[in-house]
Image (cartoon, rainbow, N blue to C red):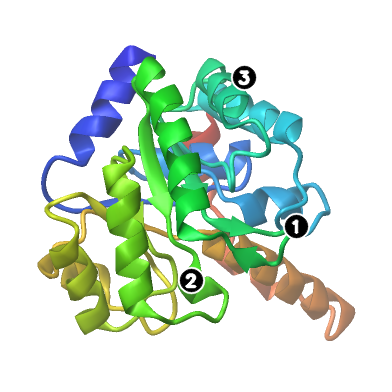
Amino acid sequence: MTDLRDRFRALHESGTFLLPNPWDTGSARLLESLGFAALATTSSGLAATLGKQDQQVTADELVAHVAALTGAVGVPLNVDAERCFDDITATVDALAGAGASGISIEDYDPAAGAVEPLETAAARVATAAGACARHGIVLTARAENHLYGHADLDDTITRLRAYRAAGADVLYAPGLRDPADIARVVAAVDGAPVNVLAVGGAPAVPELAALGVRRVSTGGALAWAAYGAARDAALELLGPGTTTFRERSLTGAEIDSAFGRD
């Protein structure tokens, strides 16, 4: 486990790497088979597998999910832990025990329906940083402004800088699309690794790399793409009754590569 955590930390030292987000064990093994150096959970994708909305997954469900993924793959796993629930230290300890190499904490409080005051959020980051440090886990602090209608880049940068000062290893403001905004964030955090979410309208990965972004993740996008493909296949059966969707399925060799044979 220490080796995986060291490998994950080393990925953040230079260059740009991709951190795709599987939503279940099968998708994790598939992504690993494609050669990704690390993976990350997605709160919305996990919730979908449980038939829930995002932000409704329990701590126990998340820990079980992380244990299943880390038991199935041999690459580091970063965990979308949302707010790290009510007891941050207990959450970090449980996720560490489940094999997490990285954990993220965000500053949106769904109970309040708002982004937390900066002082409150920074204090929570500091608590998470202390807990992560004991396990050698990389902590990512997320400023959620741009996902919840508060497109104030100055406030976002202020938050990210405060979270870095509180001990976060990686900084993340999901929802940024404009290259100039992303460049401002990268320049403002004094060399700290920055994660950018691959969203519609955002720069392509090579451009993000040129902007100095260290890590690019997908959030729930891969899960929703998979669910969309399943929906389209089902509608084809319901409509013309054909099965052309099978032409876009994994081949037997690809299935063997991802899942092996018992």
In the figure, is residue 185 to the left or right of 245?
left
Position in image of residue 262 (x %, y %): 62, 19
Q: CA distance from mark 2 to mark 1?
A: 16 Å
Residue wearing tag 1: 111
Above or below: residue 87 compared with residue 27:
above
Any part of residue 227 in sight: yes
Report which quarter residue 252 is drawn in.
Answer: top right
Position in image of residue 136 (x %, y %): 34, 20
**At label 3, which amino acid type do we have?**
Asp
Above or below: residue 99 compared with residue 215:
above
In the figure, is residue 204 to the left or right of 142?
left
- Badge 3 marks a residue whose secondary structure is loop
Question: Given this view, does label 1 or label 3 mark the residue nearer the observer?
Answer: 1
Residue shown at the point (19%, 57%) measured from the top left: 189
Q: Which mark is residue 145?
A: 2
- Badge 1 marks a residue whose secondary structure is loop
Q: Compare marks 1 and 3 and give the one earlier in the sequence.
A: 1
Report which quarter residue 26 is drawn in.
Answer: top right
